[in-house]
Image (spheres, rainbow, N blue to C red):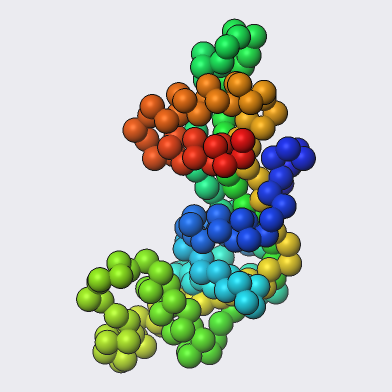
């Protein structure tokens, strides 16, 4: 990923935090000689530096992905920045955003216990704390049957890149004007970018 130095996220814990908060990612690999992408949730295992996920079995991407070096893209908040918010008309529009790229080798998961554990972690992450749904309480035969329709995988992380383009290349006074306008918006992305910009000031 192209990352000018002012926009580079160097703290790996911040990068991991972006991944955890924006875990619906895009996995890009080579399939049949061409780029192929699937959008899916990924679970980060920080201790073992890997990502867990699963493909639907009819998705052909998994069939030749074993041992491939793949790219997983995590898109954080992003929004348009209007030059009309600046103190000068000598400016052009831009886009502020946060993104993480993860590179790693794929290993298909054939072990039922490892796959079930990955699915359990995914359910725990996304179900509300007071949700009555628990994967362990679902009939094991039903889970076993449904599991045949997916192909689990894990990505062993080789490299992570983090980028936070938050107007760092502009003067603090101009950044403050942008934050002020973003905070007036009711949209979630604008609010999140304003918050991220305030942390960088």
Q: Nearer the viewer, residue 43 or 71?
A: 43
Q: Is residue 47 left or right of residue 139?
A: right
Q: Residue at x 54, y 37 (%)?
A: 198
Seen as rendered, the residue at the extreme right is 5
Q: Residue at x 61, y 35 (%)?
A: 201
- Whether residue 81 is visible here, answered yes or no, is no
In the rendered image, residue 152, in percent from the top left (x then y), is placed at: 51, 77
Q: Is residue 10 left or right of residue 147?
A: right
In the rendered image, residue 42, in percent from the top left (x then y), is placed at: 51, 66
Q: Where, by quadrant of the figure, is residue 91 drawn?
A: top right
Q: Residue at x 51, y 86 (%)?
A: 114
Q: Nearer the viewer, residue 69 or 161?
A: 161
In the rendered image, residue 173, in percent from the top left (x then y), is placed at: 61, 21
Q: Is residue 104 above or below residue 164?
A: below
Q: Nearer the viewer, residue 177 or 16?
A: 177
Q: Is residue 126 above or below residue 115?
A: above
Seen as rendered, the residue at the extreme top is 89
- Whether residue 82 is visible here, answered yes or no, is yes
């Amino acid at each position: 990923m192209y990352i000018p130095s002012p926009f580079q996220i160097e703290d790996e814990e911040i990068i991991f935090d972006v991944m955890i908060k924006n875990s619906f990612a895009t996995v890009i690999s080579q399939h049949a000689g061409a780029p192929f992408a699937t959008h899916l949730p990924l679970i980060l295992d920080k201790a073992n530096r890997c990502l867990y996920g699963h493909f639907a079995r009819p998705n052909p991407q998994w069939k030749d992905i074993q041992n491939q070096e793949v790219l997983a893209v995590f898109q954080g908040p992003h929004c348009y920045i209007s030059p009309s918010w600046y103190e000068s008309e000598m400016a052009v529009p831009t886009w502020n955003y946060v993104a993480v790229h993860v590179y790693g080798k794929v290993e298909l998961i054939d072990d039922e216990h490892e796959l079930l554990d990955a699915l359990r972690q995914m359910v725990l992450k996304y179900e509300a704390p007071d949700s009555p749904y628990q994967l362990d309480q679902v009939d094991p035969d039903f889970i076993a049957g449904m599991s045949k329709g997916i192909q689990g995988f894990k990505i062993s992380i080789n490299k992570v890149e983090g980028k936070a383009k938050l107007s760092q290349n502009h003067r603090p006074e101009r950044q403050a004007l942008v934050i002020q306008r973003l905070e007036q918006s009711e949209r979630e992305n604008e609010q999140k970018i304003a918050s991220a910009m305030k942390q960088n000031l």
